[in-house]
Image (spheres, rainbow, N blue to C red):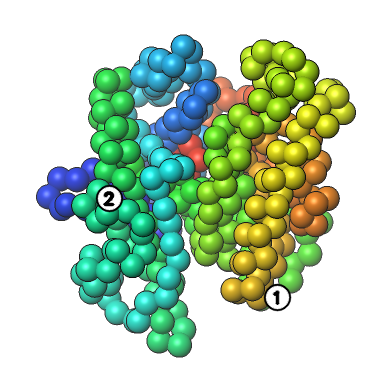
């Protein structure tokens, strides 16, 4: 099976980090490691491609203690099956941007040449301060137009990430964007099956909401291809601060309370305003998508550490009126020897980005 990969490669001979397509022979069994570096923890997923599908070899979640990210990276990478595996990592939030545009039909080589002269049209960053490229989402298109994904990341973010991994004693394979990594899971493994979901004819739109500590990202896919992406700067830290203020407890205690489903009623009033703000931004995004495509979301999948809060999981389907589910991306893989299904399932909701990163073979 051939799948499309969008990613920023480390600059060697070209002055951009291009998105390219990579093929892997079916007989290869070299593992691939995805490393998702967050604010409070790092997440690692190691996957190998077998002849009959993809197998989860290792996974881990490592807390970042006292701000020592390099130490957390060293600890988590020591848990991979082989030394010297180069991780794939991602970026998110400020300084990154994705756009979806329609371009006249042309070859990818011609598109890249044309795009390099039109970067200023798509991004509010000075051209000399970003790495950027484009990729054709659907080579067939329609009405003599091609849907194209264009993405950018500030050079300082890429360079800082490469330096961070270097400080941890690692070489980085390449750096992508987390939201593109999530779309990669759908491209490679397909859309999750929802029990009882009616299969309707025509294109199917689903959303993935990745709730991080500082930023939440909404990706909307149509038939497993990304069509919309937006960062919303409301995340788990906002919920934690609200709980800490309302209950007059420390941030650490508020974090524990937030993740305890037995205390959902107790913190309902504290997090109500932050959830309302998030829902309002999600509704604006969904309404815009419906207006542009005439497609409504059939499902919304939740991932990321912020979705551990029971209040959020209860509020979103009611207020958005969209069937909402905790995303379990690891269920799409075979489990390797010695792995506990119950342990993996308990943390699968934290591993979506890391899995998408690991699927870049």
Task: Tell me: residue 248, above or below residue 23.
Answer: above
Q: Residue at x 45, y 33 (%)?
A: 36
- Among the two numbered marks 1 and 2 on one chain, the one whose residue lies closer to the N terminus: 2
Q: Position of residue 81 (x, y in %)?
A: 40, 24
Q: Residue at x 40, y 48 (%)?
A: 96
Q: Residue at x 34, y 48 (%)?
A: 153
* Image quadrant where residue 266 sits: top right
**Residue assigned mark 2:** 130
Q: Residue at x 64, y 14 (%)?
A: 252
Looking at this view, name the residue that lies furthest to the left. 13
Q: Position of residue 277 (x, y in %)?
A: 69, 45
Q: Position of residue 49 (x, y in %)?
A: 43, 43
* Image quadrant where residue 273 sits: top right
Residue 65 tag number: none
Quarter of the picture holding the N terminus:
bottom left
**Residue assigned mark 1:** 201
- Residue 97 visible in the current orientation: yes
């Amino acid at each position: 099976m051939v799948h499309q990969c969008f990613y920023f490669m480390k600059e060697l001979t070209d002055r951009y980090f291009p998105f390219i397509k990579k093929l892997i022979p079916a007989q290869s069994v070299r593992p691939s490691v995805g490393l998702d570096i967050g604010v409070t923890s790092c997440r690692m997923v190691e996957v190998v491609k077998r002849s009959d599908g993809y197998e989860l070899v290792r996974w881990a979640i490592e807390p970042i203690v006292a701000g020592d990210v390099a130490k957390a990276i060293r600890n988590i990478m020591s848990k991979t099956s082989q030394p010297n595996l180069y991780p794939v990592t991602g970026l998110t939030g400020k300084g990154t941007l994705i756009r979806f545009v329609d371009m006249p039909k042309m070859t990818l080589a011609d598109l890249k040449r044309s795009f390099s002269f039109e970067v200023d049209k798509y991004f509010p960053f000075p051209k000399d301060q970003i790495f950027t490229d484009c990729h054709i989402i659907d080579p067939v298109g329609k009405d003599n137009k091609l849907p194209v994904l264009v993405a950018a990341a500030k050079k300082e973010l890429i360079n800082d990430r490469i330096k961070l991994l270097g400080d941890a004693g690692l070489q980085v394979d390449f750096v992508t964007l987390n939201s593109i990594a999530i779309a990669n899971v759908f491209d490679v493994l397909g859309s999750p099956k929802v029990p009882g979901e009616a299969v309707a004819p025509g294109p199917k739109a689903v959303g993935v909401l990745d709730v991080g500590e500082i930023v939440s990202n909404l990706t909307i896919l149509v038939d497993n291809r990304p069509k919309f992406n937006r960062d919303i700067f409301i995340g788990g830290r906002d919920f934690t601060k609200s709980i800490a203020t309302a209950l007059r407890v420390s941030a650490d205690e508020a974090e524990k309370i937030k993740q305890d489903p037995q205390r959902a009623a107790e913190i309902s009033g504290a997090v109500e305003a932050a959830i309302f703000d998030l829902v309002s931004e999600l509704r604006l995004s969904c309404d815009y998508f419906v207006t542009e495509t005439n497609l409504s979301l059939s499902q919304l999948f939740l991932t990321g550490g912020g979705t551990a809060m029971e209040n959020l999981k209860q509020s979103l389907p009611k207020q958005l009126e969209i069937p909402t589910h905790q995303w379990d991306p690891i269920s799409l893989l075979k489990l390797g020897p010695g792995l506990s299904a119950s342990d993996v399932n308990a943390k699968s909701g934290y591993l979506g980005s890391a899995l998408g990163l690991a699927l870049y073979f």
